[in-house]
Every structure is written in structure tokens, then in C-alpha cells.
Amino acid sequence: EAGVAQSPRYKIIEKRQSVAFWCNPISGHATLYWYQQILGQGPKLLIQFQNNGVVDDSQLPKDRFSAERLKGVDSTLKIQPAKLEDSAVYLCASSPTSETQYFGPGTRLLVL
Amino acid sequence: GENVEQHPSTLSVQEGDSAVIKCTYSDSASNYFPWYKQELGKRPQLIIDIRSNVGEKKDQRIAVTLNKTAKHFSLHITETQPEDSAVYFCAAYSGGSNYKLTFGKGTLLTVNP
């Protein structure tokens, strides 16, 4: 079974620039999550999709972050404009239910 | 919302010793508790999980215990090996009005040969 795919794996940008991350979940998994993991901390949920609908985006900084999952499969997460404090690993996870989650390799973002 | 506290933040043991990591949660509606292992620069990987209708679960050298009354759960690793060195995260999932997984801050386990 193929795992969760993410790209790019690494990204370096300057503050105020825009960046986008892509996630392809495990085939058949209806639920998709985006997490932010700051160095030394546990993953923090940014947004959860069930198929192409948003279930929870209460911790998404909506003034600069956006995410979509238009066809209920792939998803993109965008930051515009980026701030220094956005430097983190952005993890995508998928789940056949809302419990057991399988993580992708993450995108490591550095904002200079 | 749910709050998960994890201790210790770092743990160093000798190869062959046991390691115990403890977590507490705040939401009594939480009913699923996974543990993830994250090696440096890699994705978190699920190693074991337990549901609220079970008190203990074992998988080879790894076991998890759950005390619903006290709202705490623990990860036990026996006969530790250097390849067990990683960051371990506990998490709690609430199936009530807040359907999300809340993670602890992680424990850096170092197994010394």
C-alpha cells in the first residue's frame, strides 16, 4: 500500500513570499489533515477535511493560510504571505476513519 | 478543548533496560489513544494504540496502559535497543463534539549501547 505523499520535501523562502504544499493521501482515505510541527513540539492540527468538506479549521490562521481539497483526494495548503514564525514541518495525514492517522514525510519550510 | 501533557520530555536509558513514558489528558470524552514514534527528519509512525474500552494492550516489546478514571495512559518499552531511540508522541482523540487528535509535546528517548 502506497503511503501519504507530499511535495516539496524542503522549501526555503523569504518572509512575505508565498508558498504552497501538496498532499496526496492514501487511496480511499476520506479524511485528510494538515498539521504544523514546530521544532521540539508535537504536531498541531491546522485543518481537517472529510472528503472535500472542511470539518475543523479552528486553528488555521485564516488571514494567511488557506487549504483546499477540491475533488476530495489531493489537497494543497498555501501560506500568503509567510512570516518567520511559519518555519516548521508541515505534515499531511490521512485516515480511513477519524481515528488512526497515517502521516506523510512532511515539508520542511524555512522562512528567512 | 483537549489538553495532553506528556512526561518526561527527555529519557535516557541503557540498552536492555525498560522505558516508560506517561501522558495525561483532560477531556473525559476522549476514547482513542495512539502512540507515534518519530525518528529524526522522518514522519511520525503509529506504533501502538488503545481504545477506552481496554485497559492494556501489548505488541512484542511495547505495551500501553490506560486508566480512564485518572485520565492517564502510559507507553512501556521493554528490553530497549538503540534503534528505539526517537521522539515518542502520545495523542488523545475525542469522539465527542471535538473530533480531533491532540498530541503531547513528545519525549526524546535515547538508548545507550
Image (cartoon, coloured by chain):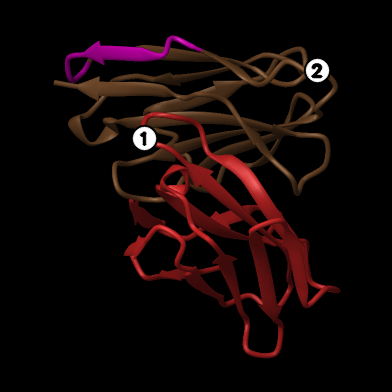
- Chain for colour brown: A
Residue A45 % position (x, y): 53, 44
Crowd rating for badge 2 (residues with CA inside 10 Å; few <14, some 14–19, many 20+): some
Q: Quadrant of the C terminus of chain A?
A: top left
Residue A88 % position (x, y): 32, 32
- Chain for colour red: B
Check whether the beta carbons of the residues at disc 1 and disc 2 lie within 8 A of each other: no
**Residue A4 visible in the current orientation:** yes
Residue at 78% x, 18% y: name it: A1
The span shown in magenta is A7-16
**Identity, as a three-letter code, of the amino acid under mark 1:** Leu
Residue at 47% x, 60% y: name it: B104
What residue is pinned by disc 2?
A27
Q: Quadrant of residue A49?
A: top right
Residue A25 % position (x, y): 69, 20
What SS does tag 2 mark?
A: loop
Q: Mark 2 belongs to which subunit?
A: A
Instruction: Using the image, determine if residue B10 lies above or below residue B55.
Output: above
Of the pair B29 and A83, the residue shown nearer to us = B29
What residue is pinned by disc 1?
B40
Foreground: disc 1 or disc 2: 1
Of the pair A92 and B83, the residue shown nearer to us = B83
**Residue A61 visible in the current orientation:** no
Instruction: Using the image, determine if residue A97 lies above or below residue A78.
Output: below
Q: Quadrant of residue B97?
A: bottom right
Q: Which residue of the protein is positioned furthest toward the left in this rendering?
A: A112
Instruction: Using the image, determine if residue A76 lies above or below residue A55.
Output: above
Residue at 57% x, 37% y: name it: A47
Crowd rating for badge 1 (residues with CA inside 10 Å; few <14, some 14–19, many 20+): few
Of the pair B38 and B113, the residue shown nearer to us = B113
Q: Are marks 1 and 2 on the same chain?
A: no
